[in-house]
Image: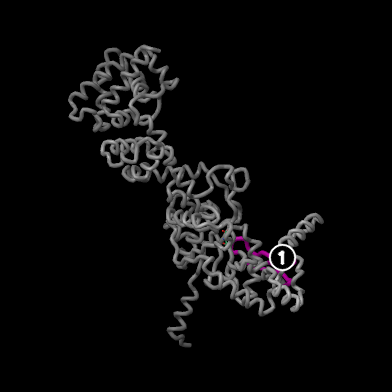
Amino acid sequence: MVISKEIQEKKEVKMVPRFRFAPSPTGGLHIGTARTALFNWLAARSMNGRLVLRIEDTDTKRSDRKYEDSIIDDLKWLGLGWDEFYRQSERIEIYQKFANKLLNEGKAYLCFCTPERLNDLREKLLSEGKMPGYDNKCRSLSAENVEKNLREGKKFTIRFKVEDGDILFNDLVRGNIKFNSKVIRDFIAIKSDGTPSYNFAVVVDDSEMEITHVLRGEDHITNTAKQILLFKSIGRKPPFFAHISMILEKDGSKLSKRYGATTITQFREMGYLSEAVCNYLSMLSWHPRDCEEIFSIYDAVSKFRIPDISKSPAIFDTDKLNWINGIYIRGKTVDELVDLCTPFLIRGKVIEKSDVGNEEIMLKVKKCADAFKDKIKVLGEFPDYAVDLFRDRINNYSKEADEILRLETSSNVLQFFLKELESTLKSHDNNEGSGIDEEIGRKLIKAAGENLKEYKIKGKFLYMPIRASLTGMTHGPELPKIIAILGLKNCIKRVNQTLKYLENN
Ligand code: GLU
């Protein structure tokens, strides 16, 4: 049989897998929702499919444009693009058209029950230990009564008729799932203000947008049962469904605000890198078959398969995220790190916004980035590490530093070191001595060490007092790097400050 080119093309168009990510703009991009977005992105890209971003904003009371903007901003930051964009609030007429069709076909009816009646009904059922749900009262309203209610201007919703029977579907992650429709009562398709209910809008859209795969959180499984009924009623085949497990805290509780950051915006503000967040999120309920742990989402595209998604809940492990973030930080060049860290230094008031154009200050930032690169796990820690080196003086000597400085040999070390600093400064063209590199730092320590040989002072008796006098601490980056960051003049100030401290305390 010869298939015409036209038919063949049409067939191919139909066969393109279509995924969608459908956030409700009622808050920022939650870590779990971001993982759903990422999985949809990975699935769509790995199957050469398309990804639809659909903003589900029909709940006008809870939705806000500022959250939509923030979700979009976070998706872009994560590097997750989409092929098509829709906003449900702009599609109200389409939902109404579908609902009217259901009404005409007798698959839905007008319900005039007031919120008060529905509330009383709910409370009554609960007090009797029964499952709350609608009692289908308006299903049997006569045409005359419907007319009368409409004439009286009574408010109404459009309710979908749930017929008895089993609802079966094969979840691509969880296997066969069965519901009995008895547990689902007639539910609202169009609310009294004319907007669609969540389930109705989703089905109309998934059908109109020719979505082939619905990949979302397992909290939607019961909605899936309702949605399958709706798909059937509008005469469309339901898409494939895949429900991903929840993300839990280590103690098994739901990931919640109680424990700190839950939105991508918060993780960004703490100084996580987008590559690290994506890498980590991709491993919540999925891992590549080769068990690699560090990979970009672009590498993951070729490895991602929906059936490999795990059924068990994912545990959010901040230590692992920090470890991964540290790896990505170390993978950055110093210049990239400077760009990434600068906003954190400004926010931490270590430098001013106007300092960004100051070559000397930015050189210092660069030296700091190089010195602390191996230590920082999140960029937000950087100001804490750097702040002391941006001050003129030492704020505080730690207990350990104080002990080192009080050793009999320490003042001697500092005197010699000071002499070296002063003579180097004299021979230096920049009178702040700020443009020095760590090589000069190394030479300075070596020269002080040479002079101290006759006193048999070496090793930690040499390095530790110098470190303590320059930083007030006994640990930190390599000494030559500290000297290069501080510059000669600031080193001199600090050693003098330390000598005074020893005299007076
Ligand atoms: N808008 C829904 C939510 O944010 C998602 C709906 C869906 O994926 O079907 O939870």
Q: Is residue 5 above or below residue 317?
A: below
- Describe the element under mark 1 as helix, strand or loop: loop
Q: Is residue 131 visible?
A: no
On screen, residue 222 versus residue 453, left or right, reads right
The quarter in which the C terminus is drawn is: top left
Q: Is residue 11 above or below residue 229?
A: below
Q: Is residue 252 visible?
A: yes
Residue at 73% x, 75% y is 146
- Give the percent coordinates (x, y) of residue 328: 41, 46
Task: Give the image quarter of residue 202.
Answer: bottom right
- Give the percent coordinates (x, y) of residue 477: 36, 31
Q: In the depicted view, which residue is nearer to us: 431 or 197?
A: 197
Task: Give the image quarter of residue 78.
Answer: bottom left
Q: Amino acid at mark 1?
A: Ile
Residue, disc 1: 184
Residue ranking furthest to the right: 128
On screen, residue 400 versus residue 351, left or right, reads right
Magenta residues, start to end:
163-187
Q: Is residue 163 above or below residue 62?
A: below
Task: Give the image quarter of residue 352.
Answer: top left
On screen, residue 475 versus residue 219, left or right, reads left
Residue at 59% x, 55% y is 245
- Does the segment drawn in magenta span residue 310? no
